[in-house]
Image (tube, rainbow, N blue to C red):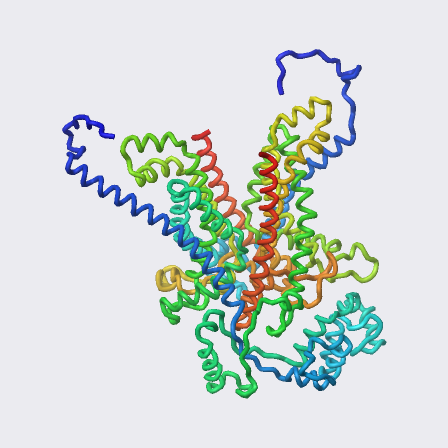
Amino acid sequence: MSVQAPERPTQTSFPNEEEYAGQLGRRQRKALAFKFFCLAMLTIAVLALATLLYTIINDSFGLVAIVNQNDPDQVVAEAGYDPETATLQDLSYDELVGLLEANVSSGVGRRMERDQRFYEDRLVFEDEATWAEICSSGEPPTGCNAAPRDHSNVYALVLERVVVPDVIASYPLVPSLLNPEAFEEEVAAGFEAGRFPDYQPEQAFIEWRAWFNPTFLTTPQSSTPEVAGIRTAILGSAWLVLITILFAVPVGVGAAIYLVEYAKPSRLNDFIQTNINNLAGVPSIIYGMLGLAIFVRVLEPFTSGAMFTTGVPPSDNGRTVVAAGLTLGLLTLPVVIISAQEALKSVPDSLRHAGLALGATRWQTVRSQIIPVALPGILTGTILAVARAVGETAPLILVGAASFITTDPSGPFSKFTALPIQIFQWTSFPQQEFHNLAAAASIALLLLLLTLNAVAVILRNRYSRRAE
Amino acid sequence: MTTDTQIEIDPGKGPFRKKSRPGELAIRGFLFFCGVLSIATTIGILYELGKESFLFFGDEEVSLVEFFTTTVWQPQVGGFGIWPLILGTLYISFIAMIVAIPIGLSAAIYLSEYASNRVRGFFKPVLEILVGIPTVVYGFFALTFMTPVLRSIFGSSVVGFFNVLSAGIVVGILIVPLISSLAEDALRAVPDSLRQAAYALGASKLEVSMRVVVPAALSGIAAGVVVAMSRAVGETMVVTLAAGASPRNFTFGQDPLFGYILNPFEGAQAMTGYVAITANGDLSYNTIDYNSIFAIGLTLFFMTLGLNSLSRRFVKRFQQVYE
């Protein structure tokens, strides 16, 4: 392509041939530099994500130095088993309770029983008369109504109260792999410097520990990092998801149907639309305040469950699963409405016209023509909105998710904790072991969100295939 | 659905008479109720925040003027000036914007002007994952990664365990995808004819992007930046975990500006941080602490509302140009 350049006008602002060639090179170099600058910036974003995931995984596995106050093998031997073949976890429920009975002071035992009893039909630490008395008092402990403990629960108690493991130091994954000796030296130096005054150096042993492991997922919360788990938090989050969906989906989809299918342009309908857009931008912590003021405080008779029983309410105040679930529901609502609106708007008008032309009423058209077509889109948007709500922490802090609770939530009116709350609490402790727990819980939370997102992607793909 | 020829129908009788359908009406009513519930939510927020704030300012210890004019926040001894908290919020948001604007805009320009479909297919999911990660995990990241890194760079005697810089950088990372996705949408909406015209005039790719496409998309980009700012102001968990729990009380003229008031290496409680820390645990009703979080919440609500309205105004201007 050689095009004869037209004669250049002789103005000072226009360069001559030579200058032009020089400028062109500069301009092209600048353009290239800019391209690489942009790419570098984008790479920073990728690196940030990589570093974040690295931090979490790095803190979830690694070497730990542990001191057991009682050797678990010895405990098993005392129970009459061969420690070579049987581990503590193999003991039966009754034997584990027996170990607790033998090793735990009666005061601590009574407290455990008041949290959650050991047997449906008999009491281990309390006597029947006192039990009946405290259960009929104004503020009965949770043990009066909750189901008895199970094997994993009692096993965790035995570990926590009888074996009493203490993680005295922990090391992240990468240095544990690259330089395990450094950790041993660090622990030894710690003993020499008197950082662990309660223990002898020979008591301590170093082992590999995956903080994120199946036991971690299935044991309840504990103040001893070694035996702490997130079952209570996972169940709490599951309850929250359930209530959020039950509230936000019907109401959100209903509002979207109203705005797309029924509403004619009017001042009120415009206002509703603007208002929904505004609500989508309100910080989540403000929804938390709304939840605290309305669901926890004003609606306390409902959210504490007092409305539904004549006797003792399931919970002594409104800081319950249902209050938090409704708060998250309100928070999710604008997002659900907006995404459902998008899905409904993408349904071609010909379907509406066809339905109405056949004599169907508006609702008949919506129900049997429009919703089925828009459903995958609605579901995808809803799942993504719920996934966002699962990770919300600030509103849960406001509505008073309990930070330390060892009993599983038993219904919508029970006290609860949730995964993000656990991560928050553990992160705010200064000790490294709790940061390990927070990292492991973060993995659990991210996996949960990944699952929800995967479901959404699968639905979207199936939908787009059908639309083709 | 307008027809050209109107058929005269007597709605009073015959097969075309309008039937009353109570079921249809009830459903319509329910759907309308769902729509109106969002208004009820807004009213609820305004009413509850307003009511408790009113009680807060009704307290004899607190005065509205003092709240907005003094610079010491110490509720235990009756210091109720909101400026230290606003300082924390704005300072962290400022650092976040310094981090997020270059990264977010460059990312948007690269994705819309340069990237092939394969490259986009790699970077877009990364940005989407960054949006999806819960903020409490970012908080953990700030405290256990960013803060130690900053302390080892600048020295642990200079950088506090809680500091504004770490929180600001991590909030910045968190809002990058917000800026990049909104800005990319704006850039892609610029008609290709503008680009073609600029190329035809001999402009390089940089000149096309920076002198033609970006100016044309400017209000859309501005909308993205303002939304991100609003998000940074309302962000809670990173700020609570990484920036600490002590408000940076100051006195103008007395405290050194860069040594103390704007020192990025020390902690400063933000508005959201105060609310979260105060509400954590069983907060009793009708105490001054309880009421104070609502007064701060109301201030925060109006700040974010203002930013969001500004952003929508930008979007509207942008849509008017290209639709």
Q: Is residue A196 left or right of residue B164?
A: right
Residue in the picture at 33% in, 46% down: A35
Q: Is residue A189 left or right of residue A433?
A: left
Where's residue A383, x and y in %?
62, 47
Residue in the picture at 64% in, 47% down: A330
Residue in the picture at 79% in, 65% down: A145
Residue B303's place in the image compared with A270, above or below, is below
Where's residue A448, x and y in %?
60, 56
Question: Which of these two is toward me, B110 or A315?
Answer: B110
The answer, for residue B243, to whether it is visible in the render is: no
Where's residue A356, x and y in %?
69, 24
Which quadrant holds residue B210?
A: top left
| Position of the N terminus of chain B by quadrant | top right
Residue A70's place in the image compared with B291, above or below, is below
Question: Which of these two is toward me, B182 or A397?
Answer: B182
The answer, for residue A387, to whether it is visible in the render is: yes
Which quadrant holds residue A138?
A: bottom right
Q: Is residue B136 left or right of residue A306?
A: left
Residue in the picture at 63% in, 15% down: B3
Question: Which of these two is toward me, A60 or B161?
Answer: A60
Where's residue A12, x and y in %?
15, 32
